[in-house]
Image (spheres, rainbow, N blue to C red):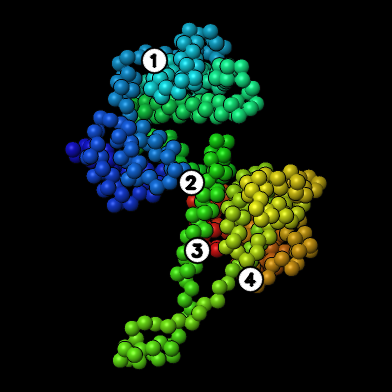
Amino acid sequence: MSDLFDHHVAFVGALREAGLTVSIAEGLDAAEAITAVHLLDREQLRAAYAATLMKRQMHRATFDSLFDLYYPAVGAAASSRQNETVRPAPAPWEVDDPERLAIREALREYLLSGDDQLAQQLARDAMAGFGAVPGTGAGGRSGPSWSPMTVLDRVSPRTLMASVLEQFLHGQDQGGLAGQTARTTIESRLRRFEELVDADARRRLAEQSNRDDVARTGIRPSLDNVSFLGASRTELAALRREIQPLARRLASRLAIQQRRGRRGQLDFRHTIRASLSTGGVPMQTVHRPKRPVKTDLVIICDISESVTSFAHFTLSLVYALREQFSRVRAFAFVDELDEITRFFAPGSDVVESVTRLVTEANVTWLMGRTDYGRAFELFERRYPEAIGRRTSLLILGDARSNYGNVGIPSLERMVGKARHAYWLNPERRQIWDTGDSEASKVGKVIEMIECRNLAQLSEFVKSLA
């Protein structure tokens, strides 16, 4: 029982390190819950842990990856040691390798049927057949290392899409609703196979070395902790889907905070007068009414290629929360500045609006390279009335101006006119001031905040509104 409890503690600790918020009470609830399920039934165990430890759907992929690492299938672990023969992967041009063809045929069957048990067995077989990488194994021990990328390169599962889609539709139009549904289904099954291959590689590495080390280095962080600048295409799509739910949660929380903060300063005179009815004991305090003040928000964002995804998510979230501000104006630049408020008309889709501005906004001039100095000078000259004493100024960018002028004098005047001013930087603080970064120089004028992921962005927006 002690070993089981230690394993549970290690699993909960790995979830915390991956970005999931798990309290001590929730950890104890999970320990109690797993005593009520059959420990040899992995899906019951998974469900018990998920019900007690998970709060948000965006954390599901990270949770499942860590669960598969700490609680691997008994059959999978046994097969990796006893019933399979590990051989070096064939060269990429050996497309007629019999084992490769057999796995691709079984994979085609899985894509048509959706049989998850078949997918799990295929992932194990594919990793055993093609995933071994010659050299020192994990932790410096003898034996091969394991690479999911090598497996996917050899098996090439996505090249099966066209033939499987044709079998799915039986001659129906691929451009219609049935075709779209079939593509979505096949794509989700392909992603599931890729996830299983990745999980099997981590399991094998964990068997050769330390499971906790693999959890720290081999598991992608939870979605809200994924860096905007380092996200994969799949993660970027998932982040876009999360913007609206996140905005709704933030809006509800901000509304509650505003209701709680409606009371103004203590009205001493009226409090004493009210206490006369209770013998001079002030049983209830009286407060002066607080005037609701909403902030104007001005956003100036660098949308050059290096930080465009960061600007997209920040604009999407802020505009989804625009009801929390009295007025929002947005400006974008590369080496030319344009006001982009027009793209966010009431009722428009925020994500679509952000996508449109990239192609329609006038943000490039000569070279198309980031020029903070020119952008700030243009802003001062064209929009002198935009910043006032009720304005919060928000600048988005990495403070890298290609070794050019960052416009410190203009920035100082803009910050001086604003009520609050913040600069959100999507780079890690450790690499500020490297190369052409002027982060510290700019940071002497305006407060610079590290903002690399949704978690940091939502915390900042919550404090801003």
- Quadrant containing the C terminus in the rendered view: bottom right
- Which image quadrant for residue 143? top left
Identified by mark 1, the residue type is Val
Element class at badge 2:
helix
Q: Which quadrant holds residue 79?
A: top left
Callout 4 environment at 10 Å: few (<14), some (14 to 19), or many (20+)? Answer: some
- Nearer the observer: mark 3 or 4; the answer is 3
Type of the residue with mark 4? Arg
Q: Tell me if 119 is positioned left or right of 282 in this view.
A: right
Report which residue position mark 2 lands on.
225
- The extreme left residue here reads 1
Judging depth in this view, the residue of 282 and 39 nearest the camera is 282
Residue to which mark 1 is pinned:
86
**In the image, is residue 387 above or below residue 66?**
below
Q: Residue at x 28, y 30 (%)?
A: 41
Label 4, secondary structure: give it.
Answer: loop
**What residue is drawn where x is 65% and y is 72%?**
389
Across and down, in percent, residue 135 comes to 43, 21
* Closer to the camera in the image, 317 or 424: 317
